[in-house]
Amino acid sequence: MEVKIVEVGEDNIKLIVRGEDHTFLNLLQHYLLEDDKVIVAKYNIPHPLVGEPELFVKTNGKNPLEAIKEANEKIVKACNELLEQL
């Protein structure tokens, strides 16, 4: 996965997430939207074969990079819990 910051503001960020698809981005969006400080979390894949996935996050008083980091930590935790159950 390669992440490129396209736009960054005090309460929003737009990223290009190369090498990922709906599987990861939908999960990330889900965990981002569980955060009360995240107003918008959406992604777009312009073309399924050649498009570069774009992620946009807007927050209310929280650093958007911190929100993304916390959501990723929750994904890792959920995956580890699943692996323990197998």
Image: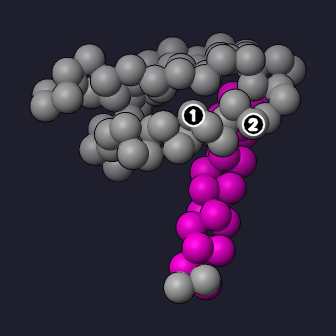
Task: In this rendered view, identify the residue nearer to me: 28 or 6.
Answer: 28
Q: Amino acid at mark 1?
A: Gln
> Upstream in the sequence, badge 1 or badge 2?
1
Q: Quadrant of residue 50?
A: top left
Q: Quadrant of residue 46?
A: top left
Give the residue displayed 66% in from the left and 57% down from the top. 73
Give the residue displayed 68% in from the left and 55% down from the top. 74
Q: Is residue 2 visible?
A: no
The residue tagged with tag 1: helix, strand or loop?
A: helix
x and y percent of residue 86 in the render? 53, 85
x and y percent of residue 38 in the render? 75, 25
Query: Would residue 76 be counted in the magenta stretch?
Result: yes
Query: Would residue 14 be counted in the magenta stretch?
Result: no
Q: Amino acid at mark 2?
A: Glu
Magenta-highlighted residues: 62-84
- Mark 1: give few (<14), some (14-19) or many (20+) Cα within 10 Å: many
Task: In this rendered view, identify the residue nearer to me: 79 or 11.
Answer: 79
Q: Is residue 12 visible?
A: yes
The residue tagged with tag 2: helix, strand or loop?
A: loop
Q: Which residue position holds label 1?
A: 29
Q: Which residue position holds label 2?
A: 34
